[in-house]
Image (cartoon, grey):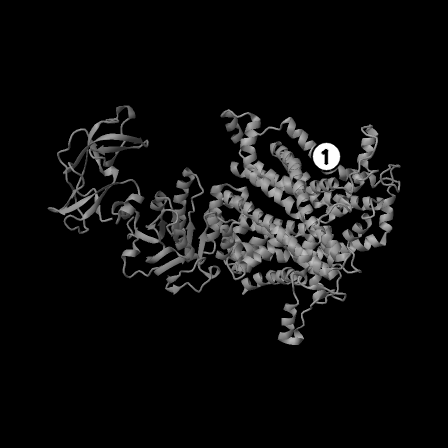
Amino acid sequence: MRRFVLIALPYAWLLALFLVPFIIVLKISLSDIKLAIPPYTPTLDFTEGWTGIKAFFSALDFENFTFLTTDDLYWKAYVSSLKIAFIATALTLFVGYPIAYGMANAPDHWRPTLMMLVILPFWTSFLIRVYSWMGILSTEGYLNQFLLGLGLMSEPLTILNTPTAVYIGIVYTYLPFMILPIYSALERMDASLLEAAEDLGCSRLKAFWLITVPLSKTGIIAGCFLVFIPTIGEFVIPSLLGGSRTLMIGKVLWEEFFNNRDWPVAGAVAVVLLLILIVPIVLFQRNEQKQRELEG
Amino acid sequence: MSQTVFEPWNDPQAKPLIQFKNVTKRFGDFTAIDNQTFDIYEKEFFALLGPSGCGKTTMMRMLAGFEAPTEGTILLAGQDIAPIPPNKRAVNMMFQSYALFPHLSIWENIAFGLKRDGKSKDEIAARVAEMLKLTRLERFANRKPHQISGGQRQRVALARSLAKAPKLLLLDEPLGALDAKLRQDTQFELMDIQETTGTTFVIVTHDQEEAMTVASRVAVMDDGKIVQADTPARIYEMPNSVYVADFIGEVTIISGTARRGDGAYEVSFAEGQPTLFAESDTEFANGQECHLAIRPEKVSITAEKPSDRRNALEGSILDIAYLGNLSTYHVELAGGQIVKAQTANTRRLSRRDFTWEDRVWLSWTDTAGILLKG
Amino acid sequence: MRRLTGFNVISLTLGFAFLYLPMIILITYSFNSSKLVTVWAGFSTKWYGELLQNEAFLDAAWVTVQVAVVSSTIATVLGTMAALVLVRAGRFPGRTLFSGMIYAPLVMPEVITGLSLLLLFIGIGLDRGIFTIILAHTTFSMCFVSVVVSSRLMTFDESLEEAALDLGCSSFQAFRLVTLPIIAPAVISGWLLAFTLSLDDLVIASFTAGPSSTTLPIKIWSSIRLGVSPEINALSTIMIAIVAVGVITASLITKRASLRQQADERAAVRA
């Protein structure tokens, strides 16, 4: 009985507030837009009984999904999101690995402090962290003031409202997600392995490449997915730093919903976005499982 | 030692405290306990001994109430315990990991079970003090478990499980986490405490020496079954199977065929080797396969063939294991059979009689070995 | 031996500079007296004063705190239950769906979570306001709580709970007297995580908030879309300061606790 309550309560909550809403999205993505409240048709009407249900299902179609393929805004947005997420993930890895590696090599009594310094930004507001770059990257911003002041160039750089700003924003906000799994993989590594490799004739660089990198592989993969997956649907960073020229699907969905009030198309955009996300999520799960098995 | 020997299992009048009746436990397709029936008597120190995965822990967890038998019944003092949940059983358990509550002091750990019984404050304080004294932990009452040593933790776990004065105390590998020296001392301490409190102890262990030292009876388990349950001496001297003979202590097994002779069986085991003689209570047919189990300390090792014993084999020394007080010789016979012989090192090492590759004679009496079917 | 090379020192220095410089600049310029945020015109705390006068910000902050406290508390209860189910309940019908629903919100884009909840609230005719934001925040943060708590439960020695049962506890007593005190640090960090996620959330709140229930992130969002403002710099500084004090205190406490434990263990070995 007690076990039943324990299971039933969170289960019911998630069914009602996670699964049911998602089914509604799926259903609306198969409906048609209509100037009404709610702004879509058909609506399920149980008062008409069986014929009502039949009419409801026969009115559902894949029109919105066909529309997504005909208007190139959408597929461009999907491709662009994937591209931005991919490049940003690679950049984050490039920036994050040396930091994680440095932390793992740091003396024992430094590590808790370094760890805290990595986690601290994660607890501060995401919005504020993105916002802090607006002042730095704008045409009159601190970066341009600094570079012009040094006399390195005569014209200010245009960074804000370009994809470059989006990359900087993503690397900055998602860096802890990359550093932490790599650091924990490196920290677990037995340092005598490197001594063994050097003893067997490796140079230090070679030992790093042949021992350290493969042993931190699960951390690298985990970190990459932790950055890649949420970046695809990212909304705040492209909106604040990317300007109108940066196309990302999270932003398109937001605009479709709030600005165009086309709920069925917004629903369809969401469904396709989820389908795209399934692949990396499944791969990520598999990596995690492999790691758990390795740990025993 | 004038009192009668403690052997309730030989007394048909004695009522067992615990009775397993055709108990089977399955986890999915895996049979952990296979149709076992046996009794444990009051005030016994009963050891379940076996390799990991033999089902000994499952047996104990069924007594504690954490597992229910798939088939069969378990009786405690004549009452079926299946419907009684673990928190209502007059059975307490000492866990392998000790399972001391890390957030509570030693005193609170020991008092934990008493508080659940709704005892008065004074009663609890008195009982805890008694337990602390029994286990010599008075000085540590206010410490937390992580502030004391491994041996002390073991005693806290014991005190906590004894505090409720259970009819039956279960001990799951109680000494497994201690180092060798401490383990020996603690074995005797456990026996003392068992005797003082008069509680029935059931201990699970994979360490045969530990089981032999502490237990009044040892049950050797293999693959979900109790192969033999008997006193340590009988388990050692009269194993009922090759498995038990091999599991407990060192032994040489010579496999051959039996033939009834005058008073003893004649065992022929290899071409060109003499026939061996062994007395046995077990019946063997002529030509039946048999295994002669012989303990190394019952084998004499001499340079010349002895004239007073019928069982004499010649071989060369392959290995000598020097154990300080004893030396075990591994002697290879013509044909490859290896026989172990043990001698007490009463002399200094430099004056040892035999060395590697010496030709020697091994011999033993007709009653030294035991003849087994399988 | 691990050794810290010159390369390590450089990458750590540059890395942490990258992580902290933007925030340091932001904090510095919150004390700028000029309205032009990128031009330094002397030290002043006037933007903090103006911020405290700004009713709209204060209202939004109050809404946010209410939502965060209530939703993180419910999420901690539900998430801890869900963690117990995941780690302890064994098999039951619909288990796969259950664990799927726990893990899915962690990787679900916020826009989708927000959109689907909004459509649900409209579908059942629920007026949007503080209540709907609380429902939404509870739903996704309970999943984070359950991940934090279940990873602690996985390393929890179950024989502790069995020992409690063995000593006469009912299963609820065993949970309350033994399991809960031991996993409390994980439950508390789960609560803190849920609280921070709720404070921080813009996207889901934007979908589920009504006109009368603007949260602080929504308010900040609508003002920073227009560009950098000194008031927002001041607000950001306050928020960063609160978080920094909280995180540093927490890490000092855990550090001291672990030092004390080490000392105790050394003493125990000698005893």
Q: Residue furthest left?
A: B262
- Number of marks in the rendered image: 1
Callout 1 amino acid: Ala
Q: Quadrant of the N terminus of chain C?
A: top right
Mark 1, secondary structure of its residue: helix
Tell me the subunit letter for badge 1. C
- Residue B149 visible in image: yes
Task: Work out whether residue C134 or residue C179 is closer to the camera in this orientation and state it.
Answer: C134
**Residue wearing tag 1:** C17
Q: Residue at x 64, y 45 (%)?
A: A228
Q: Residue at x 18, y 41 (%)?
A: B269
Say whether residue A154 is left or right of residue A73: right
**Where is residue A173 shown, x and y percent of the image?**
70, 43
Q: Residue furthest front?
A: A70
Task: Work out whether residue B212 or residue C158 is closer to the camera in this orientation and state it.
Answer: C158
**Where is residue B171 shown, x and y percent of the image?**
42, 50
Classify C245 as above or below A253.
above
**Where is residue B80 shown, x and y percent of the image?**
39, 64
Classify A262 as above or below B190.
below
Classify B134 as above or below A98.
below
